[in-house]
Amino acid sequence: MNKKLKVNLLGLATISFWALAFPFSKVAMQHFTPFALGFLRVCIASVVLLIIGIFTKIRLPKARDIGWLFLSAACGFGVYLFVFNKGIQTITSASSSIIIALTPILTAIESSKVYGEKINKVGWVSMITAFGGVLIMMLWDGVLSVNAGMIWTLAASVLFSIYNNLNRKLSMDGYKGIEIVTYSMVFSILILSPFAIQAKGELVAASGKFILVLLVLSVFSSAIAYFLWSIALSTADNTSEVANFSFLTPFFATLLGSIVLGEIPNLGTIIGGIIIVASMVVFSKRNMLYKVKK
């Protein structure tokens, strides 16, 4: 298969599975509580990733990196999933996916502090307009009508941006993408383990519909999506070939939210979403980060 075609197929498959997480999480939250759903999701995803890891021959983590992997687990899965689940309880799939789409910009801001990278003027303008889009979404119906779900989701985006930079650090230390996500997922079980009994009770009481939704979230949106993403990154000639697919997530999530839940985004979400996605495209295409010369 042509390399370019392979990367495109892997990228589209990954984004499709990630987009499923938005409407399906809303469905799952009709039965499961945020912590219980997070615990069950990482447990199932960990099993799938460990099975994949056996076949891909992942290496055991080094003792010195356990702390970093636990922090990665908290930001990328353990705490992140709780915060994400809290947020999506009260906002649409479209709103959630658009706010989560801010993650690359937040990652870049952190990278500028941690890795000595600077952002040029156009980059800062892109960031300001992106956050302006968030404000439009949050304040569309007035200051007093701000949906707490948007604040939770913005917090989730911040957490995942930290995970991205931790992922970068661990990659620089010699870990493969599949190793980082597998061990981060496994360690997140320990982080969410205080809710194991509650999760067990909710799982036993769940109908077939909610168990199926849980399996889709765990197997496809978590385990397989991250595995395919790691293959895409290792196959592509440059990271941007793959990363640019993330711009499609809000559109896929909005479409799936409409099909699965009958959601219709309000005008504020549409206007704010267009501003955010356009700002992100400009930020990515113009390669706004550059290393500071020492």
Image (tube, grey):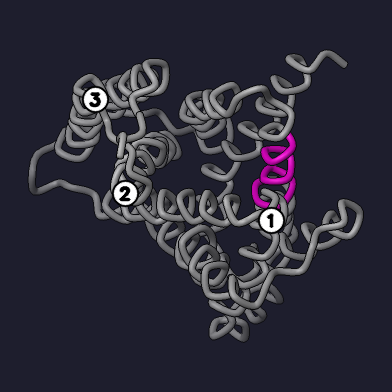
Residue drawn at the location 42% of the way across and 34% of the way down: 94
Judge whether residue 45 is colored magenta: no
Query: CB atoms at circles 2 and 3 under 8 Å apart?
Result: no
In the image: residue 228, left or right of residue 105: right
CA gap, disc 3 and disc 1: 39 Å
Q: Could you tell me the amino acid type at mark 3?
A: Asn
Q: Secondary structure at mark 2?
A: helix
Asked whether 157 or 72 is in front, the reply is 72
- From the top left corner, tell me how far across and down residue 279 is, in percent: 30, 22
The residue that disc 1 covers is: 218
Residue situated furthest left in the rendering: 143
Looking at the rendered structure, which numbered label has been put on residue 120? Answer: 3
- From the top left corner, tell me how far across and down residue 228 is, in percent: 73, 38
Quarter of image, res 162: bottom left
The residue that disc 2 covers is: 154
Q: From the image, which quarter does the N terminus lie in?
A: top right
Q: Which residues are magenta?
A: 221-231
Residue drawn at the location 9% of the way across and 39% of the way down: 142
Q: Residues within 10 Å of mark 3 (few under 14, many from 20)?
A: some
Residue situated furthest right in the rendering: 55
CA gap, disc 2 and disc 1: 22 Å
Q: Could you tell me the amino acid type at mark 1?
A: Ser
Judge whether residue 223 is colored magenta: yes
Q: From the image, which quarter does the C terminus lie in?
A: top left
Q: Could you tell me the amino acid type at mark 2?
A: Leu
Q: Earlier in the sequence, mark 2 or mark 1?
A: 2
Residue drawn at the location 57% of the way across and 36% of the way down: 19
**Looking at the picture, does residue 190 appear above or below residue 119?**
below
Q: Secondary structure at mark 1?
A: helix
Q: Residues within 10 Å of mark 1 (few under 14, many from 20)?
A: many
In the image: residue 198, left or right of residue 208: left
CA gap, disc 2 and disc 3: 24 Å
